[in-house]
Image (cartoon, coloured by chain):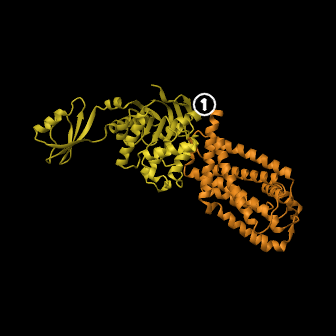
Chain colours: A orange, B yellow
Amino acid sequence: MSGELRPNLVALQTIVYREVRRFLRIWPQTLLPPAITMVLYFVIFGRLIGARIGEMGGFSYMEYIVPGLIMMSVITNAYGNVVSSFFGAKFQRSVEELLVSPVSPHIILIGYVIGGVLRGLAVAAIVTMLSLFFTHLTLHHLGITVLVIFLAATIFSLCGFVNAVYARNFDDISIIPTFVLTPLTYLGGVFYSIHLLPPFWQVVSLANPILHMVNAFRYGILGVSDIHIGTAVVFMLGATAVLYLVCIRLLVSGRGMRQ
Amino acid sequence: MSSALSIRQLTKTYGNGFQALKGIDLEVAEGDFFALLGPNGAGKSTTIGILSTLVNKSGGTVNVFGHDLDAQPSALKRCIGVVPQEFNFNQFEKVFDIVTTQAGYYGIPLRQARERAEEYLTQLGLWDKRNAASRELSGGMKRRLMIARALVHQPRLLILDEPTAGVDIELRRSMWSFLTELNKKGITIILTTHYLEEAEQLCRNIGIIDHGQIVENTSMRALLAKLHAETFLLDLKESLLIEPQLEGYPARLIDSHTLEVQVEKSLGITDLFAQLAAQNIEVLSLRNKTNRLEELFVSLVEQNLAKVAK
């Protein structure tokens, strides 16, 4: 590995640089829309409707929803970055540039995931800064906040990769975000505490992985959560490991890429 | 001379059951300029796909400069540069970025990658276009970009799949001289092409593949020596109404000013002109009806087709 390590690190740097260059080049499609969407959420749900809702979990409604909205941005952007970039490479066949080269499948995957994580974090930073115009934020636990945001971005980058591998056309890359990701996010405690739900639906909600991410992140910032943080972190670590293995298996087999 | 490429009993059966390669053996010496020819669907692109690891083989072994495809894929890949038949770069990226990014995939640090990108883009006449998005390039420029990209990690074996398809004759000739220079520098080149005069002009050795089998693998000279007769077209100064009687030379009039004559190699062409002069037929110019290699290629493929049909 030592002889291969240096070239692989250069390759990793190349993939990450290319991914970042890609989402910065098309910033009106990647960075601007989440900023506009989140401002609308802050104004409509936070200011207008939130003022009538009052407090939730001991915080103003605006403060309560900001961590969830940041997490929502991270999830959708990390996912969207990898799925569109990798599917685009497949569609244009430029993925062959990578496949004919000696880059290890691990480096290819890590490169794409870092690209997704960086876009997720870039959008998170933008949304966080915008939220400061509407409310003030304190940081309850820096370690949890950083860990959860990284793990969530990683998990959804890996999910985006799986989607891109299986996708055969552009419709296939919008089905999962539209019919799975968005409903799970909206039902994942971004806008409400699950304690507002009847007991049965509280239990059902616990099966939603996004609920754990949103609440763990909310705990990091506000110090309140509907779920047990340890469980959420273990779940996220496990999901990362499983998804990583799935993605590597897909890459090595060349599914949808090699004949 | 050591072997650049050694293929043994290579087979490929696709998921739909189509057997694209039926156990081919192929040897390409280091420093060779090798033509791999065959009709559409013969198995050329499958062979190249396996070499470049874009197609998984079903059986057999592939060895490039001593590196086995199964045991040392990374080392093998470092030795190979591939110019595919279809454009396969990001249409939205800049020309310069495409080449430097490819260098990065091979572990070449950015500074060195930039130097090499400048070198190859300049040699291929694309330096002025380095900041253009690749989709803005003409077809010929895109082909040259793929060659620059394939060379940036300085491979020892360059594989070109139809590199001059759709390229105008002037550009094709400049690409021929570029490839010849590369080969003189020691880079082994494997070329597939439908332009047989291109193969005849550039390549020293040739393999003809048909229905997933190698039907000929020899030197260009030995192959051309198999051609017993050539067909010439003579442009005549005066018009003729009937074919002249030419002993030993079957002839027919294409039109009043064009005579087609078949010339056996053993007879030569001198006696033909003597007979024409004796009949006061003046010839303005002479040309081959088809490329010599093309005549052989067609006859070999037809023979194989008959064999397969049996």
| Residue found at x 76% / y 54% | A149
Return the x and y of residue B94 as percentages of the image width and height: 52, 53
Return the x and y of residue A54 as percentages of the image width and height: 86, 71
Q: Quadrant of the C terminus of chain A?
A: top right
Circle 1 Cα neighbour tier, 10 Å, few/some/many (<14 / 14–19 / ≥20): few
The quarter of the picture where residue B272 lies is top left
| Residue found at x 20% / y 34% | B269
Is A6 displayed left or right of B22 in the figure? right
Residue closer to the observer: B139 or B220? B139
Q: Quadrant of the N terminus of chain A?
A: top right
Is B47 displayed left or right of A79 in the figure? left
The relative height of residue A213 versus residue B269 in the rendered view (above or below) is below
Is A62 displayed left or right of B61 in the figure? right
Residue closer to the observer: B266 or A76? A76
Residue closer to the observer: B89 or B116? B116
Amino acid on which the number 1 mark rests in the picture: Ala
- Number of numbered discs overlaid on the protein picture: 1
| Residue found at x 87% / y 53% | A228
Residue A239 in sight from this viewpoint: yes
Secondary structure under badge 1? loop
The relative height of residue A144 versus residue B303 in the rendered view (above or below) is below
Return the x and y of residue B145 as percentages of the image width and height: 47, 48
Q: Return the chain for callout 1.
A: B
The relative height of residue B145 versus residue A140 in the rendered view (above or below) is above
Return the x and y of residue A152 as percentages of the image width and height: 75, 53
| Residue found at x 16% / y 36% | B273
Is B4 displayed left or right of B202 in the figure? right
The quarter of the picture where residue A247 lies is top right
Residue closer to the observer: A92 or B141? B141
Residue A96 in sight from this viewpoint: no
Q: Which residue corresponds to mark 1? A: B71
